[in-house]
Amino acid sequence: MHLNIAQKIFGIAVVVLALMAMVAVYSIRLTAEISDELDALADRQLPLSNTIGRINVRILEQGILLQQLFVLHDEGPESIARIKALGDEVNADFARAKILFEEEEHSDHPVQSIFTLEESLANVENEYRQFEQHGLDLLALHAKGDTGAFMALLPDLNRQQNTIDEEIANLHIHMENVAYEAVKLADENEEFLLYFNASMTSLAAVLGLWFASAVTLLLARNIRALVRGTEQVEGGSLDTEVPVATRDEIGKLTASFNKMVVGLRLKERIKDTFGKYMDPRIVTNLLESPELTRLGGDRREMTVMFIDLKDYTSISEKLPAPDLVRMINVFFGHMVDAISANSGVINDFQGDAVMAYWGPPFSHQDEHATLACKAALAALENFEKFRDDLRTELGAQADDVDTNLRIGISSGEMVVGNIGSTEMRKFSVIGDPVNLGARLEGANKNYGTRVMISERTRDLAGADIHVRELDLIRVKGKAEPTRVFELLSEEPRTSRLQAGLAAYRNQEWEAAAREFETCRVDDPADPVPNVFLERIAYLNTHRPSPDWDGVWVFETK
């Protein structure tokens, strides 16, 4: 039987159409598999990643609350209730993750690669159960007062939390690998589809290649772009933006990714901008813990420091406004460097003065006084650099600027938190020790000293600093007398100043005068003996009462 031309053309058409149908069916099948993988990524893996992120944050918050409870002895019922509430939220997140796996298992086309994440999540949950039980055991021991058993178990808490962090990090790596495998599978399907089309007729090959390229290449390209964008963000580049080329799941995933990056970029911009107006650690705490923005504060023992530029008023009369601003900025720059290098928090710039403070959560409870004293000594060193920079900035005008600085440091219980109104507030410290620190800064001019600290600061810093006792004074606005000390950079030389102070307080004026005169001879540059010699001359003619306590009262600030 011979086939005519029409039959041959029809046969060829049937074959071509059959080949085209085969290519179309196979291409659709491959596309569906890729779509299923992407659906799983968008509908399962992304929510799973968010759930794991929440688990990680809540476990970290539990750990921080436990540390506060155990280390800072914060035994308020709110903290314990919050720890238990976080445990409930973590358990709910684990349950939510299991539901995502169950939904994938019962889907029409389950993606097996996602199920490989289940075992890693189970490891995280197992480690958390141990961490949770350990925390409950510690709470029980802490409540019973079993210090021995409590201290024996406490070091394991951080190790267990580190183990959880490692497991979660491993799970994130595993999830990245699953996403990578999805991209790899798309590439492999694309390559196989190209070889399959090449074996068909020219027309079927061209049509199949066009269809495969139009679909598969677009998917693979978008996935690669998304992976590259993720890697760039992970590397710290927040200017990344992935073009949205389609309106499918990949397009939605890409749009969500870009929205997330915009949020991260805005957050970093806020931190960077406001970090120039207040300590970046305060900005970070307020952004990451919005509950800290409420008005109110807590009482804590902290240390405050005031630094003031001596003779600023007379200097401001000599210098033009632009030069005065440059001088102040250079001065503030050196003082901020000294404070920041010693973990201090800049509270305010007050004209030519700097106010800073130390204490939890910005420095350890046992070191805030020592850090403040070290910052003061660093400020003295930086002040010499400031004088050199001033000559560079002002040239010959610097010869007319003769200045120095005074520093007052005070420690004690003060209120730290958000202070202000509902419309405007500031994270700051207030209290009697703050006022005393400001008064001590000003009291330096009466003794010719540069750094004066309170007795409580001296007691807290202990052997970490060198001091000499100056006087027992009562500053304006304060009823109780304060013993004050001069902070020194090194151990003071043997001096008869203390013997002179003892005789002075006993109203033994002649003996005190001899001791102070000896001090003046030993060190003519020391201004303190002259202060007491002048004071003794005054008291010789204005005798105090027999029960005088040796306190010198300052009537001005």
Image: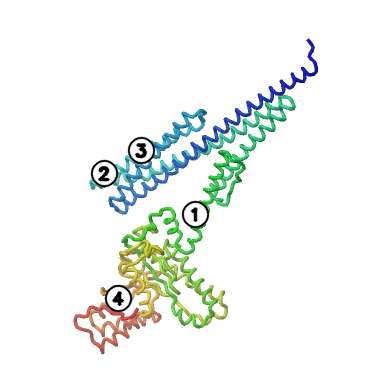
Instruction: State the image coordinates of residue 22 (x, y, percent, origin top left).
Output: 66, 24
The disc at residue 129 is: 3
Q: In terms of image quadrants, where is residue 17? A: top right
Specify few, some or many for label 3: CA neighbours under 10 Å numbering under 14, 14-19, or 20 or more: some
| Residue 214 horizontal/vertical position (percent) | 66, 35
Residue type at tag 4: Gly
The quarter of the picture where residue 533 lies is: bottom left
Check disc 1 and report the residue beneath it. Answer: 267
Q: Which mark's residue is nearer the viewer, 2 or 4?
A: 4
Question: Mark 3: which amino acid?
Answer: Arg
User: Is 45 placed above or below 389 here?
Assistant: above
Give the mark nearer the N terminus: 1 vs 2: 2
Residue at image mark 2: 140
**Residue placed under numbered mark 4 in the picture:** 477
- Badge 2 or badge 4: first in the primary sequence: 2
Q: Position of residue 155 (x, y in %)?
A: 34, 45
Secondary element at tag 4: loop
Q: For the C terminus, give its image quadrant.
A: bottom left
* Residue 520 - label: none
| Labels 3 & 2 near each other (Cβ < 8 A) | no
Using the rendered image of the protein, determine whether residue 247 is visible from the camera's viewpoint. yes
For the residues labelled 4 and 3, the Cα–Cα distance comes to 56 Å
Q: Are marks 4 and 1 in contact (CB under 8 Å)?
A: no
Q: Earlier in the sequence, mark 4 or mark 3?
A: 3
**First of labels 1, 3 by sequence position:** 3
Image coords of residue 198 (percent x, y): 71, 27
Q: Viewer-proximal residue, 13 or 528?
A: 13
* Residue type marked 1: Lys
Where is residue 87, by image quadrant? top left
Secondary element type, mark 3: helix
